[in-house]
């Protein structure tokens, strides 16, 4: 497989799919440019080689073409500042303006195309169907959009000599610019960007080549949203720590009283099956023994510590209790590979942040002793950043949905398009 470091971009135009889906305020100012900064090493490598860059990205979820609210023109100036190179802008990604500017691009120059999702062909989903459309009409629209999606991808590919995918955040989508476009480049002219490579290698370091003991800390409000991740991990980890709201489903499944805590009653049998599978696979499944409970979901709620199986009616668990913290942090500190997805409590409220903080600090301690630690998922990333500890763990993923699907064991279209299987 071709790599960015081994490829000489001198005199070549590279179509680089990035994830510049950054948050904007009402004045269209960027409020968090993390995703842009993450792509800079890839873009600068191409420019340093003497190549030129055509940037393709989406922004938001536009439902029409064009929608000024989601125009990438709002971020061109900031990207120019960060790159140290004036970034040209094409007011479309398909029209004559884009084609002509791409053709005229000289070594060292950068062109940003307008939002790829202004076209339904990017996602391959028909738009504008009436609510009462028949099944036949829906099938015909889907068939038509899939055919035009290939033409869309081929047009984007025609602008460049090579293709670089550095958008891990969209790698789980079989979109035109993340998967189909790669079909129009030879194997030695398509590759991962640095961010994409680092993300894939970090996950595979946990799932495929981990140093044992391996510990996964999985949180979240619902078992139903994480069950496929849990089932995949049960064949790969030594320790599985369940935290967050989903822990109360496990507690109730074992006959406990969980008060008003989050609980999925339709998942009780599945929770017990998971406990049995963990035992069969010799996985140390650690469930919280106690919680910090509250009389309401609020920062100023009355609180007390209570065992997880005897939470009174009217009270709900919102954080790990001290016994659970001690038990779990010891397991984490003795680990050599750690995956953390999902906070331990409602860390946004100070009264319920201690468990999440303790887990983060235990991961840092293990990392300092040589463990590899991967933090992923929006809330976990927000927590590690809020605590100021992001630089003290091995890797913090930008992936979101792509990361979760990869942990589930799925093959991501954006990865498969470059690597092949």
Image (cartoon, rainbow, N blue to C red):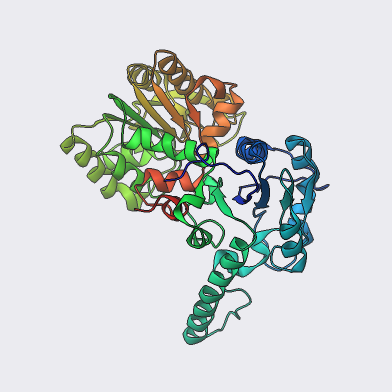
Where residue 217 appears, x then y in whole percent?
Answer: 39, 31
Q: Is residue 125 visible?
A: no
Q: Name which residue lies at 48% across and 39% down.
A: 197
To which quarter of the image does residue 67 belong? bottom right
In this view, 129 is above or below 150? below
Check the image and name the residue furthest to the right.
27
To which quarter of the image does residue 381 belong? top right
Check the image and name the residue furthest to the front.
11
To which quarter of the image does residue 239 belong? top left
* 410 left or right, relative to 191: left
Where residue 351 appears, x then y in whole percent?
Answer: 56, 24
Q: Is residue 121 visible?
A: yes
Which residue is nearer to you in this view: 141 or 174?
174
In this view, 124 is above or below 214? below
Which residue is nearer to you in this view: 210 or 315?
210
* 300 left or right, relative to 324: right
Q: Name which residue lies at 46% across and 45% down.
A: 2
Q: Name which residue lies at 49% across and 79% down.
A: 143
């Amino acid at each position: 497989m071709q790599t960015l470091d081994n490829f000489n971009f001198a005199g070549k135009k590279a179509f680089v799919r990035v994830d510049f889906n950054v948050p904007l305020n009402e004045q269209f100012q960027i409020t968090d440019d993390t995703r842009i900064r993450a792509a800079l090493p890839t873009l600068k490598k191409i420019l340093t080689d003497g190549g030129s860059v055509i940037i393709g990205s989406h922004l938001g979820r536009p439902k029409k073409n064009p929608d000024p609210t989601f125009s990438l023109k709002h971020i061109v100036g900031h990207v120019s500042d960060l790159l140290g190179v004036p970034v040209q802008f094409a007011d479309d990604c398909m029209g004559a303006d884009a084609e002509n500017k791409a053709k005229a691009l000289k070594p060292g120059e950068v062109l940003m195309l307008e939002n790829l999702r202004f076209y339904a062909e990017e996602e391959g989903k028909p738009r504008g169907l009436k609510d009462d459309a028949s099944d036949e009409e829906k099938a015909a629209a889907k068939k038509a959009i899939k055919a035009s999606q290939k033409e869309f991808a081929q047009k984007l590919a025609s602008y460049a000599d090579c293709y670089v995918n550095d958008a891990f955040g969209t790698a789980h989508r079989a979109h035109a610019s993340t998967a189909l476009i790669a079909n129009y480049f030879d194997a030695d002219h398509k590759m991962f960007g640095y961010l994409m490579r680092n993300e894939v290698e970090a996950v595979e370091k946990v799932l495929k080549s981990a140093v044992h003991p391996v510990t996964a800390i999985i949180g979240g409000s619902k078992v139903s949203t994480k069950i496929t991740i849990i089932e995949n991990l049960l064949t790969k980890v030594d320790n599985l720590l369940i935290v967050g709201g989903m822990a109360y489903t496990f507690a109730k499944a074992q006959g406990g009283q969980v008060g008003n805590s989050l609980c999925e009653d339709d998942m009780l049998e599945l929770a017990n099956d998971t406990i049995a599978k963990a035992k069969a696979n010799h996985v140390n499944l650690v469930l919280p023994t106690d919680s910090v409970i509250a009389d309401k979901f609020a920062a100023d709620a009355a609180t007390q510590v209570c065992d997880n199986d005897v939470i009174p009616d009217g009270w709900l668990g919102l954080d790990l209790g001290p016994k659970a913290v001690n038990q779990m942090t010891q397991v984490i500190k003795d680990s050599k590979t750690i995956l953390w997805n999902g906070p331990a409590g409602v860390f946004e409220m100070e009264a319920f942040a201690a468990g999440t903080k303790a887990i983060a600090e235990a991961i840092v301690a293990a990392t300092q002793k040589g463990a590899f630690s991967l933090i992923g998922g929006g809330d976990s990333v927000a927590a590690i950043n809020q605590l100021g500890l992001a630089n003290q763990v091995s890797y913090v993923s930008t992936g979101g949905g792509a990361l979760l699907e990869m942990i589930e064991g799925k093959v991501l279209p954006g990865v498969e398009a470059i690597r092949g299987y």
